[in-house]
Image: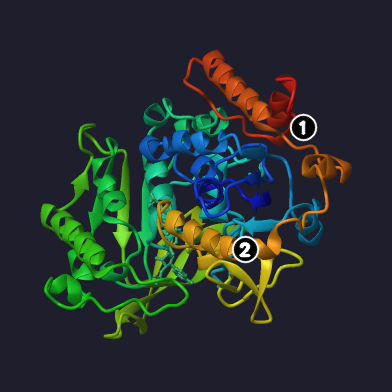
Amino acid sequence: MLRVAVVGSGPSGVYTAQALVTQDRVPDVRVHVLDRLPCPYGLVRYGVAPDHEKIKSLQNSLRTVLEHERITFLGNVEVGGGGIPPERLGELYDAVVYCVGAATDRALAVPGEDLPGSCSATEFVSWYSAHPDAAADGFALRARSVVVIGVGNVAVDVARILARSAQELRPTDVPHGALGALAGSSVHEIHMAGRRGPSQARFTTKELRELSGLPQARVVVDEAELARDPAYADPSARVPAPSSPPNAPPPTAAARRNVEVLRGWAAAGDAGAGTGGHPVRTIHLRFFLRPVELLERHGRVAGVRFARTVPDGSGGVRDAGTYEDIPAQLVLRAIGYRGIPLPGLPFDPVRGTVPHLAGGVLRDGVPSPGEYVAGWIKRGPTGVIGSNRSCAKETVASLLDDAPLLAGRASAPDPVAALRAWGLRPVEWDGWLSIERAETALGRSLGRERVKIPDWAGLLSAARSGGRGGG
Ligand code: NAP
């Protein structure tokens, strides 16, 4: 028998567990999937926007995996930090696969970044996703104008949620406090700005197109600004590969499709406000603007100063020597995620990932059997949810290659008892099912469908109310 701990229950962790129990090279593999939170599914629960119900429904297939007879979910188990150290965890299992994602935001590193009113998009996403670590006071949304920095899918998500009405979001599982704030939102103008051109934007076409279908918003683009991009002016032109490591360049075909959508919007004058008649909000999609400073007034953010950029001919940009200020009372920085080091594990500070060979952790360049990585902590914060399947399979193949070295390494006959002895109070599957029931009951009491519980105390008390397995 091989006992494996998978740290993280997001898609990469669940696909890793699935790959471990569905292979036939080592027949009896038992997997414990640990998560710091009492709830499973990682970014599918706490990152996918509430109005993306189809992607959210992926939880159903992740649930089927976690209910497999040889897989055990253990929530409320922190590895590192105040929880169990990785080296101790390594003694409890034959192998550990870290699927801990990219847990922090990239820094913009410009003056004013830390002003009140300047937040990472992750903070905003965590708030409307009911993440229990999100600030309790949340976002009042008294801003009239918001600047979203970055043109990736997270930027599109936050712009879209800001542009939606509370009525549109009411049927989703958005927490009740956030729904109330969105109902009272003063936001009228949403400016989303990329430092390079439209053919280097990182959003996917489906997500981009969705912006023009919002009932109460319109999208405005500036044809002259778009046309600074040679690939916009000439659709047959080769799209230069983006040059900013460590991000992978988007496929050329995807960039062309994005440009096609933007060209259509430019031709139409503006896009959207589909069915709702008079648009309440305007999304300004801007390019070739590099943020250089967040402006301040009365101790709060008052806008963003951008340097105008021009293409450098190889996918990058250079400053044109002019500036543009966009007033804003809220600035959301959506410039990507970054992995953070886990104490006791090697870390590449440049890439923000754990050094590995096909998923096997490398210590000083040498493979360390028993330690593996999958997902964003392995390959960086890129790709769609499905990218985690092949990533997990590669890691599991490496683990199985090492299996003869690993079997019997685990010292504890019962790792769950050992975790409890360490002072942890795992939330088992029954506890999670109790949380689900409590969220359905909360929704019913509010006249809504299921509504997420947004705080640690509420989640843990719901987990424990179900009796067995509640930590
Ligand atoms: P991302 O795709 O890497 O986009 C980051 C954006 O920030 C890029 O436009 C980037 O521009 C810009 N940026 C980076 N550093 C900057 C700086 N210093 N100043 C100004 N702009 C800067 O990251 P993301 O949007 O956080 O998404 C992360 C991953 O999650 C992606 O794989 C994404 O597809 C995925 N995701 C998917 C969905 C979905 O499918 N619906 C939703 C959310 C997230 P440069 O290109 O110039 O660096």
Horizontally, is 81 left or right of 167 in the view? Answer: right
Determine the residue positioned at 45% across, 37% down: 61
Q: Front-most of 348 and 157?
A: 348
Image coordinates for residue 354, horizontal then vertical, percent? 61, 70
**Which residue was labeled with disc 2?**
372
N-terminal-most mark, 2 or 1? 2
Image coordinates for residue 51, horizontal then vertical, percent? 39, 36
Q: Are marks 2 and 1 in contact (CB under 8 Å)?
A: no
Q: Is residue 268 above or below residue 335?
A: above
Separation of marks 2 and 1 at Cα, in angstroms: 27 Å
Q: Classify the position of the C terminus by image quarter.
A: top right
What's the amino acid at mark 2?
Tyr
**Which residue was labeled with disc 1?**
471
Determine the residue positioned at 66% across, 51% down: 4
Image coordinates for residue 162, horizontal then vertical, percent? 42, 43
| Dot 1 crowding, Cα within 10 Å, few <14, some 14–19, many 20+ | many
Camera sees residue 297: no
The secondary element bearing badge 1 is classed as loop
